[in-house]
Amino acid sequence: PLPAVEIVDLEVERRLLPRGRKLIFSRALSRALAENLARGGQSILLLNRRGFSSRILCFGCGHAERCDHCDVALVYHATEQCLRCHYCDLRRAIPEACAGCGARDAALLGLGTQRVEEEVRALLREARVARLDRDTASRRGTTERVLRDLREGRLDVLVGTQMVAKGHDFPGVRLVGVVFADVGLHLPDFRAAERTFQLLTQVAGRAGRDALPGRVIVQTFAPDHYAIRPVRDHDYESFYAEELGHRAQLGYPPFGHLASLVVSGPDEERTREAAERLVAVARGAGEPVEVLGPAPAPLARRYGAPDFWSK
């Protein structure tokens, strides 16, 4: 039988916390982890964001530490005790004071797999815990060793990104927890809802693959979102119908085709002008197409160069 899925509203949980305390595990997930460990079951925790915290932010001026070459915030990695760019791999020491105003009142915001691993170790001190994400998998033999340990019962809890969600068959896994289901839900991509539903459905299938029933707990700030709500009942048809309606209204695939033209260059003004010329050519081609843009790329600067796109 398919595992029972419980959806936890993190907004409700947040209101119950003391002021200033960070919410990582809901009451339901904390209890389930402890009970599953006591019964000898294994657990998988999914958070599709590696690292320790998403960024360092100054509460005084709002300055965030960002990459020198790419238009993204740097991510704190606890193991290396440094800030890293997930695009060009720039590394920087953790600042003692804010680079914007000099204040020392900066804080780690966001959540990553390293932070979740640390929280599990604090919650379940006797548990055998491992983490599997792109950082740990880059070390030769780590992925094979971790998955073998889980399969052979030498691990109690595995924390990981989407690489722990797909295709694995571990009979001892009776509990799957999705720490924050909203991570990919609001990305600037028309497939964001589809990919979120797909990932949640896949990771839910890791629980209860043996004779014993499985349990899945999905933590989210959007429990009624059409990509999350149907996961509770394993209701693919419901999600499909609603997603198809949105796609039809906007002419997105499978009702139309999309082409994205990306213009890159070291000079922002000349790059924008080139993109505008492409738009003019496309609109004057006489073909039945809708042209959007040009607009700044979602990641407007990468490896030191600006990117602009039109489609």
Image (cartoon, rainbow, N blue to C red):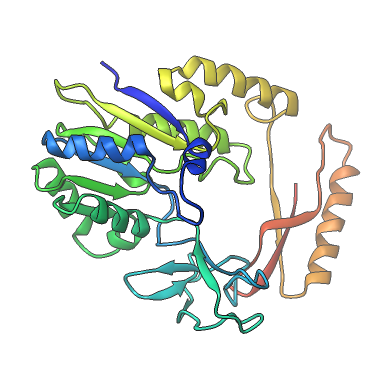
User: Left or right: 126 with respect to 274?
Assistant: left
User: Left or right: 144 with respect to 240?
Assistant: left
Residue nearest the observer in this picture, 235 or 23: 23
User: Left or right: 109 with respect to 298?
Assistant: left
Against 295, residue 82 (above or below) is below
Residue nearest the observer in this picture, 120 or 250: 120
What residue is drawn where x is 20% and y is 52%? 129
Q: Is residue 143 visible?
A: yes
Q: Is residue 166 visible?
A: no
Determine the image quadrant of residue 201: top left
Residue nearest the observer in this picture, 127 or 242: 127
Give how far across and how far down residue 274 sits, in percent: 82, 62
User: Left or right: 252 with respect to 129?
Assistant: right
Against 80, residue 167 (above or below) is above
What residue is drawn where x is 44% and y is 53%? 49
Determine the image quadrant of residue 65: bottom right
